Image (cartoon, rainbow, N blue to C red):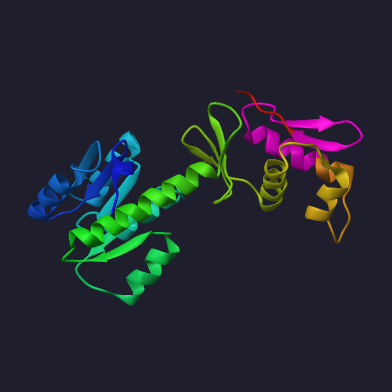
Amino acid sequence: MNLDALKPLSLLYVEDEPLIRQNAIEYLSRYCSKVYEAQNGLEGLEIYNKHKPDIIISDIKMPKLSGLEFASTIRQDDKTTPIIITTAHTDTEYLLKAVELQLIKYLVKPITSDKLQEALQMACQILVSNNVGLISLDAQTCYDTFNQTLTIGNTIIKLTHNELLFFDFLIKNRQRAITYQEIENLIWAYEGMSMDALRSLVRGLRKKLDMEFIENVSGVGYRLKFFK
């Protein structure tokens, strides 16, 4: 299994057992250029916030903050970083939570090199997919088409349902202007669209963006403007 794609990546390993953590760090350092370590979820969060690692591996049962609590905190603002959870026991409740948190792998200890390599390969594939679906509007503003997530810098911009529908449609049709009729069919198909409602929607979305990415095309509709 070829793991050369891991070479330029950073990884955070969170484990409260010193011997397990030491052995894992030595092993993972063969593949990743930078491996950070933490002994509990709180320490893991500090390192995550400071370094933004490309991949995270975390034990599930730890003092101060469990692996699932740690992952849940990260997922509040970060929907894309691959997270792998390790545990000594299989538990249906944990498995369901892992699915909810979009964790890419649930590894049961003892973890063999084959299992770990398989999980790392999955993480690489996800990172590649995420990059393919990432549209940059400028140096700071990006839209993830797979997860429908708008970010400015490291901050996720929370959009309303209609704002997300409108912005996602703009992105998918970024080579042209989308028409008023298309917007009405997309958002107000049943009740009909008023221009006041549309202007209010655009105004609210523009306030959440740092630059004038949404451009009005007179008599036609709207299109995206990129700043690169």
Tell me, yes or no, whether the highlighted magenta stretch contains residue 169: no
Hey, which residue is sitting farthest right in the picture? 219
The residue drawn where x is 72% and y is 42% is 170
Report the span colored magenta: 199-223
Q: Is residue 106 above or below residue 3?
A: below
Q: Quadrant of the C terminus?
A: top right
Depth check, front residue: 11 or 67: 11
Tell me, yes or no, whether the highlighted magenta stretch contains residue 209: yes
Q: Is residue 124 above or below residue 93?
A: above
Residue 164 horizontal/vertical position (percent): 66, 48
Q: Does residue 97 appear left or right of residue 16 in this picture?
A: right
Residue 150 horizontal/vertical position (percent): 57, 41
Depth check, front residue: 198 or 92: 92
Q: Quadrant of the N terminus?
A: bottom left
Residue 192 horizontal/vertical position (percent): 89, 55
Residue 102 horizontal/vertical position (percent): 43, 59
The residue drawn where x is 63% and y is 24% is 227
Hey, which residue is sitting farthest front in the picture? 1
**Image quadrant assignment for residue 172:** top right
Q: Number of callouts in the render?
A: 0
The residue drawn where x is 19% and y is 68% is 88
Q: Does residue 182 appear left or right of residue 104 in this picture?
A: right
Q: Does residue 15 appear in this view?
A: yes
Hey, which residue is sitting farthest left in the picture? 19
Q: Is residue 174 above or below residue 181?
A: above
The residue drawn where x is 22% and y is 61% is 114
Q: Does residue 59 appear in this view?
A: no
Hey, which residue is sitting farthest bottom in the picture? 92
